[in-house]
Amino acid sequence: MSQTDTASGGGQGLPPANTPPANTPPKAEAPSHRGARLRRRARSLGGLVLSLALTLLGLLLITFIIGRVMPIDPVLKVVGERATQAQYDAAYQAMGLDKPIWQQFLRYVSEVLRGDFGRSISTGHPVSEDLKRVFPATVELATLGTLIGVCVGVPLGVIAAARRGGWIDQIARVLALVGYSMPIFWLGLMGLLLFYGILGWIGGPGRQGIIYDGMVPTVTGMILIDSLIAGDWGAFRDAFSHIVLPASLLGYFSLAYISRMTRSFMLEQLSSEYVTTARVKGLSEARVVWGHAFRNILVPLITVIALSFGGLLEGSVLTEIVFSWPGIGQYITKALLAGDMNAVLGGTVLVGACFVGLNLISDLLYRVLDPRAS
Amino acid sequence: MSPLLSVRNLRVSFPTRSGTFDAVRGVSFDLGRERLGVVGESGSGKSMTGRAILGLVRPPGRVTADRMELDGQPILNLPERQMRALRGARISMVMQDPKFSLNPVMTIGRQITEGYRLHTRTTPQAARDKALEMLRAVQIRDPERVFDAYPHEVSGGMGQRIMIAMMLAPDPEILIADEPTSALDVSVRNEVLRIMDKLVRDRGMGLIFISHDLNLVAEFCDRVLIMYAGRVVEELPAHDLKNARHPYTQGLLNSLPRLDHPVERLSVLQRQDSWRDEEIATPFPGGL
């Protein structure tokens, strides 16, 4: 008997007690399960940070290359069409374009690390300043939208899977189908027409009513939060009445996606053996679904939510245009049409960095949620 | 003495596109405080019989029976709430592969205490003590450590012993073991079976041992039901297996290699259509 026990207990899965990591002194007593697990996590965390830095560097390399291969002369954009050759050459050298390409890249990286994306030609401001202005607007909208999508979509998907074929499942199916297929600008315009134009329940396009414009001191750039910090309830209510419709629309679209994915993840889990085990134990269906199956879909679900949130952070151009929302989607689109490469690349780096950051967060969450991950 | 479990004319059917499919077609048996083996090839309805007893056949599957009684009380198609009170507490089941039948993201300790606490309404501390006691009973040497471990951190044999500990913790009267050793290495198979066998006998439980392994069943059971195509074709004491009369059982036995009787070629089982529906000499003659 004891033979198999040693073989199975010591050899297969349990971490061997005799190889402590190099940086922690070996302890006298056998390390506990949790301790070993934590140390393993700490070690893999180092690798994660390294891969993150490499990803960001790759992102910068790509934006750098795009900036160089674009058929837009950056010097000409600075000095203007009527500059003399001497002026042109001076600017050419000042921008370091005469240096070898790798030096140009290093210069680009160091500039970006200092938060310097150059000056936007269309707005005349430094790109970083522009981004500081437009990105919070998008973050505010995307966060609220994702919150709505998650808070409604996840329970809807879980219940649809648990009562497969029931009326909730049917409703969820129709909701998702409409969400997938309805163009957002049309829905946005109809929403504005109904709730703003006819019923007058909500604020119109834009982030704020004209009375409150610039009344709340900017701290985060997100008006809902800034007005709370300032304790200005009037401004908060006004900002909320403006954001509620675009956020609901974005929320509805991410709900469609999240609920469908949740449902299919849950169906897969609900047909697995451990769910039968839970039922055999005599657990209620709610505990089987939420306590057992749902915990097992958290990892893929987080990926889906992070992707959907990342997509919204990119700025949903159509929504921003319909609602005159001064977000990053509009900003980048306008810059692109104006050939304003500094603004485009700056915005791209920011959005890309957000994606990488979201990936990091979901990676960290995996480790917490799935004991097999580390 | 009335039997622990009494089943008469159990049928499980599933509607399909091409009509109704009957997975179980009129199975009858009694279970006392004994070890009953159920043998048959895959698709013979043996697993479905076990699930039907636990009320785990999900719609659109349909379960009917002339009688299904636990200790004289009808348990067929009980309301879900009453069925839940039986499941785990009075009838329990061990499934095939612990790799899939244990929840991968929940500690072993929590999985064991969960069912126990549900049925006994005891304190977390008492449940923990009980879980450790059960882990010790299935001969796990370091129960404290295993209590906090996750299923992927233990081996298959250990996982199956944990499963047994988990299912026996609330002291059920009947354990359905559905191919409990098919996923295990041969080396740990017997050990797991012996542990299960001892616990079941010490507690005076009834065991339904579902398997496709005739030798295993002959060794660990008192009585054997042979199933074919959703029906019981033969029932006989385990030690009498060699004297089986039904051609299907004989065919199964002949297709096994024997040390004491080596043959050049093992015979291939020849199935006959008549076995599906012919009259069977049951121990419940004259209808049920």
Image (spheres, coloured by chain):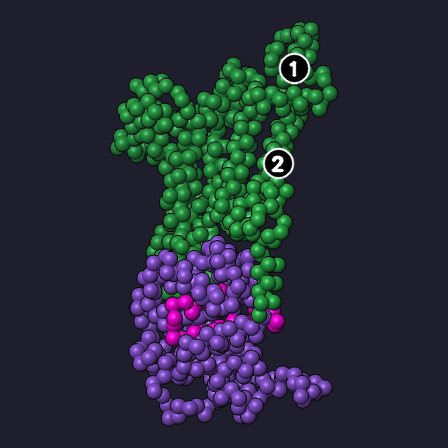
Chain colours: A green, B purple
Q: Residues within 10 Å of mark 2 (few under 14, many from 20)?
A: few
Residue name at image x 64 percent, y 7 percent:
A83
B19 shown above or below A245: below
Question: Magenta includes A15?
Answer: no
Q: Which residue is mark 1?
A: A95
Camera sees residue A273: no
Residue name at image x 48 percent, y 58 percent:
B144
* Residue B158 left/right relative to A86: left
Residue A90 quadrant = top right
Q: Nearer the viewer, residue A1 or B4?
A: A1
Q: Percent x, y for residue A276?
A: 44, 64
B27 shown above or below A245: below
Q: Nearer the viewer, residue A235 or A38?
A: A38
Mark 2 or 1, which is nearer the eye? 2
| Amino acid carrying mark 1 in the image | Met
Chain to which mark 2 belongs: A
Q: Residues within 10 Å of mark 1 (few under 14, many from 20)?
A: some
Element at badge 2?
Answer: helix
Q: Which mark is residue A50?
A: 2
C-alpha distance separating marks 2 and 1: 31 Å
Of pointers 2 and 1, the one earlier in the residue sequence: 2
Camera sees residue A17: yes
Residue name at image x 55 percent, y 31 percent:
A353
Pointers 2 and 1 within a single chain = yes
Q: Percent x, y for residue A311?
A: 49, 37
A41 shown above or below A86: below
Q: Which residues are magenta?
A: B162-187
